[in-house]
Image: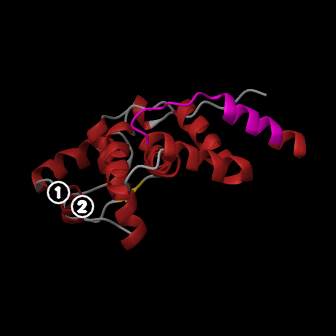
Amino acid sequence: MEKEHILTSQQIISDSLEDYLEAIFHIVADKQAARAKDIADRLQVKASSVTGALRLLADKGLINYAPYDLITLTPKGKRLAKDVILRHETLREFFTKVLAMDREEAEEAACKMEHAIPGKIVDRLVQYLEFVERCPRCRARWLSEFDSFCEAESITEDCEPCIAECLQELRQD
């Protein structure tokens, strides 16, 4: 069965415009519609920057926008905003849950990387996160072992004792 190709935001808008779409999505989710001031506040940019970005997004059919009016996402804009948010959240969750990174540091890295990561890799990260969350052997053991590995200044033991222990556990199951 052939998978339908969905145009992603990476193919039609810049990183900066992705940030605007993401901000509009979150503001609309909270308030039903966004105002230019809300967007400027959220992104910590000047109102003039917001106006230019809104015009570009409207020209691409991603938002409903008129000066001094409320801003909403079009169905296409909403799809693309969700794509950006999925990439962002997946990266942040991977960094915090698998790599055990500080949430603030993970958030910052996700913001930077969300614009470049291909959808296929996001899909695989989602699968890996689901695997880590569901697998009882993986979740507890791998994450604690990874923490120990990261904390060790130098790894002095080889993998043989660990492999032997894993094989023994598998034989018992």
Q: In this picture, is 41 found above or below 101?
A: below
Find residue 44 and name its label: 1
Q: Nearer the viewer, residue 63 or 97?
A: 97
Q: Position of residue 139 (x, y in %)?
A: 65, 51
Q: Residue at x 67, y 28 (%)?
A: 160
Q: Nearer the viewer, residue 73 or 152?
A: 152
Q: Is residue 48 magenta?
A: no
Crowding at mark 2 (Cα within 10 Å: few <14, some 14-19, many 20+): some
Q: Count the marks: how many?
A: 2
Q: Position of residue 59 (x, y in %)?
A: 31, 41
Q: Amino acid at mark 1?
A: Gln
Left or right: where 51 falls relative to 19: left
Q: Residue at x 67, y 36 (%)?
A: 162
Q: Position of residue 156 (x, y in %)?
A: 50, 30
Q: In this picture, is 140 found above or below 156?
A: below
Q: Position of residue 35 (x, y in %)?
A: 25, 65
Residue furthest to the bottom in view is 31
Mark 2 lies on residue: 42
Left or right: where 138 falls relative to 114: right
Question: Does residue 134 appear anywhere in the picture?
Answer: yes
Magenta region: 152-168
Q: Residue at x 60, y 30 (%)?
A: 5
Q: Amino acid at mark 2?
A: Arg
Q: In this picture, is 122 found above or below 21?
A: above
Q: Residue at x 10, y 54 (%)?
A: 46
Question: Does residue 83 appear anywhere in the picture?
Answer: no
Name the secondary structure under disc 2: helix
Q: Quarter holding the N terminus?
A: top right
Crowding at mark 1 (Cα within 10 Å: few <14, some 14-19, many 20+): few
Q: CA distance from mark 1 to mark 2?
A: 6 Å
Whether the residues at callouts 1 and 2 have beta carbons within 8 Å, the answer is: yes
Left or right: where 124 falls relative to 2: left
